[in-house]
Image (spheres, coloured by chain):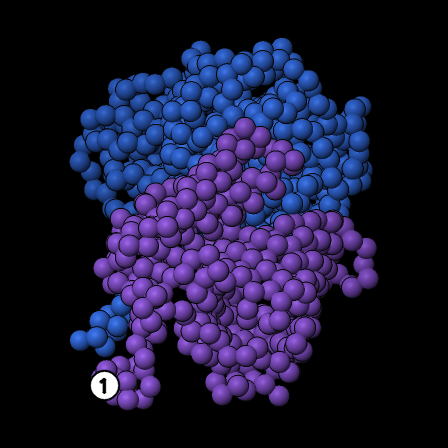
Chain colours: A blue, B purple
Amino acid sequence: MSALSNLILRRLSVLLLILSMSGCEDRLGARNELNSSVVFKELSNGLSIRAYGGSIMKTEPVDLLELAQPLTLRSQSLDMRIDLQSRTCTPSVVHLEITHAGPSLPEGQFRVFFDELDPVLEATRTSLAGVTQLEVDADSPDWTPLGDTRLFDLEPVSDTPRKLRWTACLDRVNRYAKLIAGHTDFSGCNFPETSLTASACGEASTQNNQNVASGNFVVRHRVKWPVSRRTTLAVWGSDYGDEINQAKLVSALNAARPDILILNGDITKMGTAAELERSVDFFDSQLDIPWVATLGDRDVINSGSIEYINRIGSSTFAFDLGPTRVIILDSADQALGLDARTQLNTWLTQSSLGWSAAAPSHHLIVTHVPPFDPSGHRGAGLKQRHEGASFVALASRSLVPYVITSQLSDYEVTRAGQTQIVHSGGGGGSGGSLYWLKVTLDQDCEVGLQLPCRYPDEAGLCPCILLEKMPL
Amino acid sequence: MSRRTGCILLLLSSLFWTKTAWAEPARQPLETAEQQGYMGRPENLKPGSLLGGSIAVFPGVVFHGLGHIYTEDYSVALSLFAVEIIGIGMMAASQILNAEYGGSSKTAPAEQALSHVGFVLFMASWAADVIGSYTGSAPFTVLDNQANGTRIGVQYRFAENPLNRFRHHFLLSVAFDTHRLSIRPWLDLEASLERRELGIEASVLTVGDSRLKDNVSLGIRGARLENEPDGWANQSLLGFMDTRFDLGRWIATLKKFFIFNRIGYGYSGYQFSERASNVPSLLQETDLSDNWLYLESGANLALAANTDLSISLVQDPTGVISPVKLSSAVFDTSANEVMKVEMNHRYEDNAGIQVQLVMGTGFGIWLGLEYAL
């Protein structure tokens, strides 16, 4: 009996050890999954959506025969790509809305595709390779274009935050797509007569079966805001949700009018969903410029670590501002993780963020937790120094001029190889000084310093950067 | 937060449960034992109690000392409860410092030390209550004499760390031990040789006669680590002080139950390569300097004359397994630690087996063999 009980206890202890080891720390993986979930969503009614430069926020599926499908996206760039796909035989009406659109009106472009390559077109292209250049869409080379790129109108809505709305009418059977400013119902789409009758329709294939018409019908949208040759970013963090300090910041930014505000984490004190909601509502209602946000270590203490996805969207993303790529990384767990570093490497080495433009000349990384704390014994940097080293080594050899962080309130710059780590919270959350960081990117180099960059322009020049501490 | 707390409690309680399984005392009829010289329990020693130990596990996890109240050791129970309160107070103070001065370099070391020590006091007083009330006043086994001489060791390590891609490691070490001096060079190679570490640790027994008893040692550890895929290397140096003392000095039911601690301050110089998949040369200029605090506290007891078990909390930002918020599971602070469980078994004075578990962000398992030359 004693031997048996010992055996049971031994087995039980091993089981508990395994359970303890495997279940105690998976927040990093959980947020990676949440972030992935707002990039692509497949709805049960035959529609799917993929977003670049923004997060998919609301996507309740509806019966397409009776209602329009609402889709809400949060803008996280000044050049968004939205691929709306249909594999259903039913004509679909989709009400799209982009929030946090900012005061200026973007240009809307769209093009229609089947998401498989026409075998005839592919064979012709192969046989004529080197002789002539057949038309291929550079941004979707594996799809068959069904028409030219066209413009469409977006309806600005003076709400808080500012929104843009339009309606996409899709009919896969008849290869019909129509985009209308504002939200309209079924009748406004003017679908072809045959769409409304039960015509023969093959279900979309998930494999390339040499029949292009069996593929998904895709409407690719581009929503692009104008960007001048000199752009300014505002970076702010670690206000711990202090309403007075947030009000001072908003007042200053509404006067200074930078192009975009990056809230670099710790906009709550204890990371509750209520705190996060209050801060987000405040910036939504008071700020006149577009803003994006990532998380700080305080924001993930409580339910904010999950609720953030419904309030700020993905906490890791990148966007291009002219020749500069701004990369926002979630380091709230005092860690990046292997997946995030792999993604970072892709953003640093490849040009496409949905659109095949020229490679950005240089990159800025914005993340809450610095890879290394200047006072190392304080331990405010990444919790494993070797990950910090891998991160900085990658940034340094990619000639990233600045890694801007907000974990520490007071302004300080430290050098790590070719990269400078900027410690700049500014939110005054821990009793530090109150300021915002103004980052000016100037292609004409009238202001700022010309630092080495990875991909200089044709003249061999890099854009200039100026960092300024703006006291409040 | 509650899930993490649950995980830690499960883990620790599971370790205590294994004690009876591992100890497996030989059972003989009383008469036979008395014929062989068994004198019975002296009158001044208290008996252990299974029920007392169980009460100490729960509800004793909330009120430390309940197990000793059951065994009528009221002064020890009061001491354990006081230590629990002190531990909670230290963790609470750490949280207050974190909330009020979260970004201050002046308060952060104190905040981390308070969290670390407070958590260790809390867990140690609970463990002392469970073990002490279960075993009674009978002292734990004492390890054989300190092993001196030269020993070589080979270890395999599996590391499941989501922050890097290195999983399988092989370590080769040599220990040169005299009565006072200990020198241990080691080589740590990842299976595909993409991560390589060469290091040496030396320590001097400064106070005390044996490393197995109450003592204070001073030491230094130096290493060079190369990470080829990510293109960096570092040189690090850690100065440390080890202390070890017998809790039985103060608690009669915990004779030969040792508390140990290592506190150190480290420096690292990092070199970055201009290319990935390349290691900077040894003499390349340092691109980044860093320093850190090392804190390790834990408990150690001998399960048999040649087997000992240690459990400790380690704050080391340069460790193989990335740390996680353990001591701050209840009171949120900035401290990050791993939990380490280690068992060593010696076989006939010339061979040894080591098993080590480290849990943090992911986990690592060390399996090692040691042979005395």
> Quarter holding the C terminus of chain A?
top right
Q: Is residue A375 above or below residue A101?
A: below
> Quarter holding the N terminus of chain A?
bottom left
Task: Name the side, left or right, on which B190 lies relative to A30.
Answer: right
State the SS at label 1: helix
Residue B107 drawn at (x, y percent): 61, 36
Q: Is residue A363 above or below residue A465?
A: below
Which residue is found at the position 31% from the left and 18% from the top? A184
Q: Which residue was labeled with disc 1? A: B31
Task: Name the side, left or right, on which A233 lies relative to A190.
Answer: right
Q: Is residue B331 above or below residue A29?
A: above
Residue A245 drawn at (x, y percent): 56, 17
Task: Choose top left, top right, bottom left or bottom right for residue A17.
Answer: bottom left
Q: Nearer the viewer, residue A345 or A141?
A: A345
Identified by mark 1, the residue type is Glu
Q: Nearer the viewer, residue B293 or A302?
A: B293
